[in-house]
Amino acid sequence: MRLYETYDELQYLWSETEGILTGAIKHWPDGSPIEDESQALDQLESALKEIEDERDEKAVRISCMVKNALAEAKALKEEKMRLHKRQQAAERMAERLKGYLSDFLEPGTQIKDARAQIGWRQSTAVDVFIDPEELPWEFRRVKTEADVTKIKQHLKADGTLAGCELVTKQNIQIR
């Protein structure tokens, strides 16, 4: 039985229990009559316990899978960071070597062989050496985003802000 099936089975057994207690159910699903109400309730209690145990075991197994997935994600993140540092070091080394070459070769010098080709190209860059606040508006970029921390503080204090609301969530924790 899958975890979601245990939920349905528990709901069914609880409704059966309620039906027996209220007298609405007088027969088992196979059609045989329920002769002893306390015995029937004991059977249902036993079935409920069995399914709850199965549900709990499945939940623990899924929790272990979550922990394994998080551990793998952490290891991958650490490996990604390690490789990123190596990538940056290699890029810095390449930039230093390119700078070394440009310091000791005359601009425009062309060198070519089967392994590498050295050439030059012209480029144009903009160097902004003043504070961007001093530039006219048409030469600035402005990024606008919601300050959720301030909004949350305001909603907790006052309780109203058009288009915003506090939402309480239940987040599962697995340790």
Image (cartoon, rainbow, N blue to C red):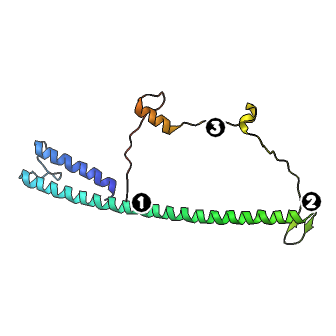
Amino acid type indicated by mark 2: Pro
Give the spatial CA distance, label 3 vs label 2: 40 Å
Q: Which residue is mark 3?
A: 143
Residue 175 locus on image (x, y percent): 37, 59
Camera-side residue of 36 and 175: 175
The amino acid at mark 1 is Val
| Between marks 2 and 1 in the image, the one whose residue lies nearer the viewer | 2
Residue 93 percent location from the top left of the image: 74, 66
Quadrant location, the N terminus: bottom left
Q: Is residue 109 left or right of residue 84?
A: right
Secondary structure found at label 3: loop
Q: Secondary structure at mark 2?
A: loop
Q: In terms of depth relative to the viewer, which is nearer, 1 or 49?
A: 49
In the drawing, what numbered circle is on residue 93? none
Give the mark, 3 or 2, whose residue is nearer the N terminus.
2
* First reached walking from the N terminus: tag 2 or tag 1: 1
Task: Kindly report the distance in space between the C-alpha atoms of the residues bearing marks 1 and 3.
Answer: 37 Å
Which residue is at 29% across, 54% downward?
A: 6
Left or right of residue 123: residue 87 = left
Q: Residue at x 53, y 37 (%)?
A: 147
Which image quadrant is residue 83 in? Answer: bottom right
Q: Pick whichever, 26 or 30, lies toward us.
A: 26
- For residue 66, which numbered disc appears in the image? 1
Up-down relation of residue 14 to residue 164 (above or below) = below
Q: Amino acid at mark 3?
A: Lys
**Against 122, is 113 above or below?**
below
> Residue 107 got which mark?
2
| Number of residues whose C-alpha sits closer than 10 Å to that of mark 2, classed few (under 14), some (14–19) or many (20 or more) | few
